[in-house]
Structure formats: C-alpha cells, structure tokens
Image (spheres, rainbow, N blue to C red):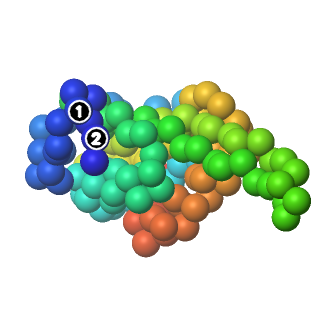
Amino acid sequence: MSVAEGEEESKEEYVARTMDDFDNTGINRTTQFFTTYAANDIFADIHEFADKMDAQVTVSNKKWKMDFVLHQAENKDQSGELIEHALATKIGVKLLKVDDKKTCVEFNHKEGSRVLFLKEYMRIAAHLKDMNDATLA
C-alpha cells in the first residue's frame, strides 16, 4: 500500500481526512455510486483492491481522494505477433458527502485509455457491489 509520501497507512489513519460535499447540480456520472458504509471502510477496500491489481496508488493526506494508474499488458498471438498494445489509465476516486448517512463514491478518468478506464471501473464496481446500497433520492 503506498501513499503520497511513500509511507504505509492503516485503515484507522484514514479517518483524519475531510470530505467534500456532493454537488448534485452537475451531470450525473455513470461511474459513481452511493453508499451508507463508513468512509474508512470504502476507502480501505478500494485501496486494497487497487493494490491487488498492482496499481501505482497515490493517496491524499487531507481529503478522501486517491489516484491510481493501471496497466494492461501487451497481448501477442502464438507466433509472437503483437495483437494489442499495452494500455494504461489513471483513475481518480473521491468520496463525497451526500448527507449524514450517505456518501457518493465517484470514479473519474484522469488520463490514458478511456476504454481501459471503463473496463477497470466495471471490475471495481463488481468488487464493491455490496457497498452500492443507497440511492440519491
């Protein structure tokens, strides 16, 4: 697990962060969900999942934000011919306060392959499906 300063960080240390408010005046994103789970549990689960995917993780020390870079390896056929180039994508994650009981978990494409971003978001969302337990209404 890596953090901005390169130090190890436990789940309990996440609680010292501040959370921005959710702004519903903009467009609704398809890469967000709402939850009633505790922020430190959500953050720790996403961080652990990113680490398992061998992502390069950067965690904010002040806000409930993290970025991670994921790589997809090159694919070659049996003869060694390149079928697919290596791709990378940078994903930003923010936890936003909706109200006293709900949090918005927002995933943003920051750079790199948008296709890989959407593919990886679907994997992360499937992993976190139990946490997707609330709606905005």
Determine if residue 11 is in view: yes
On screen, residue 97 versus residue 86, left or right, reads left
The span from disc 1 to disc 2 (Cα, nearest Å) is 5 Å
- Comparing 62 with 134, the one in front is 62
Q: What element carries label 2?
A: loop
Q: Is residue 83 visible?
A: no
Q: Residue placed at 65% from the left, 31% from the top?
A: 112
Numbered marks: total: 2
Location of residue 23 with respect to 49 vertically, above or below: above
Q: Are marks 1 and 2 in contact (CB under 8 Å)?
A: yes
Q: What residue type is labelled 2?
A: Ser
Q: Is mark 1 on a helix, strand or loop?
A: loop
Q: In the image, residue 67 lies at what x, y percent?
A: 43, 35
* Dot 1 amino acid type: Gly
Question: Residue 9, position in %: x, y?
Answer: 16, 45
Q: Is the residue marked by circle 1 packed among few (<14), some (14-19), or many (20+) residues within 10 Å?
A: few
Q: In the image, residue 15 lies at what x, y percent?
A: 15, 45
Task: State the mark number for residue 2.
Answer: 2
* Residue 117, quarter of the rendered image: top right
Residue 6 in the image: above or below residue 12: above
Which residue reaches farthest front? 79
Give the crowd class for mark 2: few <14, some 14-19, many >=20 residues within 10 Å: some
Q: Is residue 123 left or right of residue 37?
A: right
The foreground one among 59 and 35 is 59
Q: Residue 6, percent across and down?
A: 23, 32
Question: Residue 88 falls in which quadrant of the image?
Answer: top right
Q: Residue at x 57, y 29 (%)?
A: 110
Q: Name the residue under label 1.
A: 6
